[in-house]
Structures are given as C-alpha cells and as structure tokens.
C-alpha cells in the first residue's frame, strides 16, 4: 500500500496536467476520461468504493460522451452559418 | 469590466481568502489519520438501528435523507434547465427517427463493434440493476446504478447506430421515469406523515442485516433515485445527440452517422 498510493497520486497529477496541456479538443476528452479512470482507482485504493463507482460512471463515461457530442455539434455547423 | 479592474479584484480577493484557506488547510486532520467521530458513531449505531450494511446508503437515504431529497430536485432542475436551453432554438418537435446532417461522413461500424456492444450492453444493464438493487448491502446505490444503466443505453447507440438508439429510447418515457422517480422520493417523505410519523421516518419493516431486502423505506427511496437518474441522464444524452441534427430536415430513415 505504501507504494501504490504515492504512485496513484503521481498518476493523478500527470493525467490531470495532461488534460490541460493537450490542445486538441478530441484528445483532451480522452485525457479527461483517463483522468477519471485514474481517480477511480485512487478512490478505490483509499477505500471509498461508492465514490469510485460514481467517478467511473460519470467521470469516464457520461461526461466524455457529452463533450464528444457537443464537439460534434459544433463541428457540423458550417463556418458562418446561422447557429 | 476592464482587465485592470479584474486583476485588482483577483488580487484583493486573494489577499482576503488565501490566509483563510491556509488556516483551514493547516487545521485539517493528517492524511490517513483515523476515522472522524461522526463516522465512528454511524458505524457503531447504524447496523443495529437500521439493519443496513452499507453506511453510505444509510446516511444518504435515512439519516440525512432530506439532503438527498434536495439533491434529487437539484438534478431534476438541472436537467430540466438543460432540456429547455437545448430545445430553445430547435423547437419542441423531436423526430422519432435519425436524420442525416449534410456534410458529415457516415462512418460504417465494424461487425466486431456491433457484436461487442450486443454482448456488453445487456451485461452493463444487468450490472446497473445489480448495483441499484444491492444499495443497502454493497457499495453503490440508486445514483451509481442509474448512471450505469444510462451508459448501458449508449452501447445501443454505439452498436446499432443512431436510428436504432432512437427506436429504443423514447423521450416521453424518460420524462415519466425522471419525474416519477422524484415524485416517488417525495412521497417517501410525505406518506409516513399520513401515518402520524415524522417526515421520511422509516416506517417499513427493516428486514435483516446483510439481506437484499433490508433498510425498509430506504429501498423505495433508492428506487426513486435510480429511476430519476436513469431517466435524467438518458434524457441528457438524447438532448445532446439531438443537438447535432436539425429538426426541420426531411427524415431519411436508415441513415446513421457516428
């Protein structure tokens, strides 16, 4: 356990930073999903399975999907067209 | 507001708020220190008082049930707001079938994707139902199970395409599911009052500890939350998906796009 927790904190920091540093919106969405997955493992390691389940369902499935669809909606609008 | 005023405001609020935040952070219990007093009390009394093995559910649905009722209606209001906002310029009329946006590529899905989704979809929904039903026994509950169920419907979209998804998902059912869930939760608070008990008092038989049917009224409230969350999240997905197409286009059944 003494190795796992610092490792997970490091992964959380790396994946969180990656969300900010990745500039392409589509890749950014996948970075958010990965960040959610890492947080899920972290919450599980900290013995909070309820929060982990919520994070898994919302953070790495529902929110990335909504972002993807929103991005699609923006992209299908022709430039200069009336929204 | 000019940038200069904004920076001044930021500096001013930082000057006031940062010392407060620092003092709070310094006063926090150390990482990994023992369970707080409230948690210890809950762990000590709940198994006997409520016959429930999952403390989080006991707090959410019974001990602090009023807070969850508030959250329930916050979710309802948030989703209603989103629907109103998104339907605002698209109009009320939801077409039952998928429509094709000009200029967007139709990406054919591989048979492996369809097969994987057809296998994983029912299993995901089964797991969601399991999480909902075992709220008082194992980690999870109405909210988590509801979101898993809503994500399960997305596998229909991934496997069968948009038109298949729209055939399976009906907006009116989702409205009924969401509103009905919130109503069920509110009734769980009001019905005990008719019998002379307090608001949301657990009047149903509590059952046996670690049994599926334990917790009494908690199970009904949990079901209400599950219904509202499933309906609400699926409605959210539906409204966002609808946003990528235009309502006044002619229908072209059979067409789908990724």
Image (cartoon, helix red, strand yellow):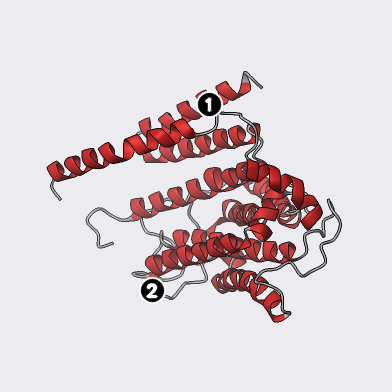
Question: Residue B109 appears at what percent x and percent y?
Answer: 56, 47
Inspect this view and state whether residue B233 appears.
Answer: yes
Mark 1 burial class by Cα count in 10 Å: few <14, some 14-19, many 20+:
some
- Quick check: B56 left or right of B106? right
Q: Mark 1 lies on which chain?
A: A
Q: Which chain carries label 2?
A: B
Q: Estimate the x, y position of residue B219 in percent, counting from the top left.
A: 74, 62
Q: Is residue A68 above or below residue A22?
A: below
Q: Is residue B143 above or below residue B37?
A: below
Q: Which mark is residue B91?
A: 2
Residue drawn where x is 22% and y is 56% of the image: A80
Q: Do labels 2 and 1 share a chain?
A: no
Q: Name the residue under label 1.
A: A9
Residue B81: quadrant of the picture: bottom left
Circle 2 — which element? loop
- Element on which disc 1 rests: helix
Q: Nearer the viewer, residue B14 or A30?
A: B14
Please name which of the two marks, 2 or 1, marks the residue nearer to the observer: 1
Name above or below for residue A22 compared with residue B195.
Answer: above
Residue sitting nearer the eye, B250 or B88: B88
Q: Inspect this view and state whether residue B254 appears.
A: no
Structural distance between the alpha carbons of marks 2 and 1: 46 Å
| Viewer-closest of A12 and B57 | B57
In this picture, residue B67 sits left or right of residue B128: left
| Residue at 67 percent of width and 49 percent of height | B56
Q: How many marks?
A: 2
């Amino acid at each position: 356990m003494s190795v796992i927790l610092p490792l997970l904190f490091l992964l959380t920091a790396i994946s969180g930073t990656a969300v900010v540093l990745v500039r392409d919106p589509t890749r950014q969405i996948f970075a958010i999903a990965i960040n959610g997955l890492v947080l899920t493992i972290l919450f599980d390691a900290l013995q909070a399975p309820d929060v982990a389940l919520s994070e898994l369902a919302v953070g790495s499935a529902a929110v990335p999907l909504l972002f993807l669809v929103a991005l699609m909606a923006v992209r299908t609008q022709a430039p200069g067209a009336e929204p | 507001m000019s940038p200069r005023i904004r920076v001044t405001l930021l500096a001013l609020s930082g000057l006031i708020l940062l010392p407060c935040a620092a003092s709070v952070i310094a006063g926090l219990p150390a990482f990994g220190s023992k369970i707080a007093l409230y948690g210890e009390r809950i762990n000590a009394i709940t198994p006997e008082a409520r016959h429930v093995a999952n403390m989080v559910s006991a707090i959410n649905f019974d001990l602090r049930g009023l807070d969850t009722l508030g959250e329930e209606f916050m979710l309802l209001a948030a989703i209603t707001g989103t629907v109103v906002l998104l339907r605002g310029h698209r109009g009320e009329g939801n077409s039952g079938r998928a429509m094709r946006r000009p200029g967007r590529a139709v990406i054919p899905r591989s048979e492996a994707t369809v097969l994987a989704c057809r296998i994983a979809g029912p299993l995901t929904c089964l797991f969601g139902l399991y999480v909902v039903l075992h709220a008082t026994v194992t980690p999870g509950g109405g909210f988590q199970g509801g979101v898993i169920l809503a994500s399960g419907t997305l596998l229909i979209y991934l496997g069968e395409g948009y038109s298949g998804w729209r055939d399976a998902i009906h907006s009116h059912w989702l409205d009924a599911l969401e509103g009905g869930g919130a109503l069920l939760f509110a009734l769980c608070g009001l019905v005990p009052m008719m019998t002379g008990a307090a608001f949301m008092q657990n009047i149903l038989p509590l059952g046996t500890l670690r049994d599926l049917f334990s917790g009494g009224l908690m199970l009904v409230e949990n079901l209400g939350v599950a219904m509202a969350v499933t309906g609400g999240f699926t409605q959210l997905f539906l409204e966002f998906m609808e946003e990528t197409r235009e309502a006044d286009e002619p229908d072209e059944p059979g067409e789908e796009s990724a």
